[in-house]
Image: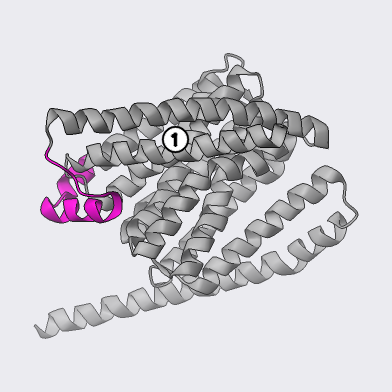
Amino acid sequence: MTFLLLTAGLLLLTLGADVLVRGSVRLSARFGIAPLIVGLTVVAFGTSAPELAVSIQSILLGRDAISLGNALGSNIFNVLATLGIASIIAPLSVSQQLVRLDVPLSIGVSGLVLLFSLDRRLHQTDGFVLLAGIIAYTVFMFIKGRKQGNGDDSLDDYEREYGAIANSGFIQWAQDLALVGVGIFMLVSGSKLLVDNAVDLARSWGMSELVIGLTIISVGTSLPELATSVVASFKGERDIAVGNVIGSNLFNLLGVLGVAASLTPAGLPVPPDALTFDIPVAIAVAVACLPIFFSGYTIDRWEGALFLGYYVAYMSYLIFKSTGHEMLPLFTTAMWGFALPLTGITLSILAWRGWRDRQKRQRERSAQDHLA
């Protein structure tokens, strides 16, 4: 029965996020917001609504570790699993804006969360700072999106992804607002089912609430991001596929953790394992995006496979450690002694090649301008 109720919660979360995103995106389309900006804001935040709903529910039930693990685990899943699977389906083109602004911002925010957590607690003031950050980011992106909006071309992109946009009459506005309301209701209902039954599983398996948040709950709440990016990859909407992940990660750190810390008067406790391992892993995952995104502004299939392989390794480590498995020492030695150094060398080579190619293109453009 616990598994059935947990599955029902995941289903409600996934369907609720889809309904919420459709209503929100169609409302945004009526304002002529550019598709990339919607991927970074409306779609990303909508698909992150399950994380927010679960985190709020966890705080209200006194399950603080689930809230933290959910946000961190979702970020790790989004980059390693979601981008990995989507780029294996089809190599993903990466917008220069992501490389120049959003990925560095994601790295900076991840570092800020680590800094706030050094005293083993995210205080209310820390939460307010994070919330101020997501508000500022959203306002900035919408202002930029309004300037980049291109009328009919923008509407065409929306219609391919979400269906034809009817005239902006009262009925159409009411229908879209109703979708948003139904989506929120499904998210709230699903989050309660998921948290209640995940806690029961944690107790029965002897796993900590942090690990449950990092594994079962983070994967479940990240299903909307995975579905959105995979479908966008199949349809060739690469801006939405990649922008959704990066925007969602920013929302998880600034919005989800910000709300969770703000709702706890004594602050959100940060377990030692999260401070020494999971938060650094989230930072490393964000940093790993730069050289891969930087190399020709694409994520190739082999890079996606590398991401996916590391997610499997991360999950294996969590399971081995939480269950005290005898394979843990050998697995840890193999990762630190071979896999991670090899990946570091590979990413360094990619970054160097990307920098060299960009310098070459700049020299060629300067030569052409000089001849002209």
Q: Is residue 132 visible?
A: no
Q: Is residue 169 above or below residue 236?
A: above
Q: Is residue 183 magenta?
A: no
Q: Nearer the viewer, residue 289 or 220?
A: 220
State which quadrant residue 329 falls in.
bottom right
Q: Is residue 144 magenta?
A: yes
Furthest residue in direction right, as rendered: 326
Q: Where, quadrant-wise, is the C terminus in this rendering? A: bottom left
Q: Which residues are magenta?
A: 143-167
Q: Position of residue 216 (x, y in %)?
A: 66, 42
**Total labels drawn:** 1
The amino acid marked with disc number 1 is Gly
Q: Residue at x 60, y 28 (%)?
A: 193
Nearest the camera: 129 or 67?
67
Q: Quadrant of residue 366?
A: bottom left
- Dot 1 falls on a residue whose secondary structure is helix
* Residue that carries the numbered disc 1 in the rendered image: 16
Q: Residue furthest bottom?
A: 371
Q: Residue at x 40, y 43 (%)?
A: 44
- Residue at image point 56% right, 57% down: 80
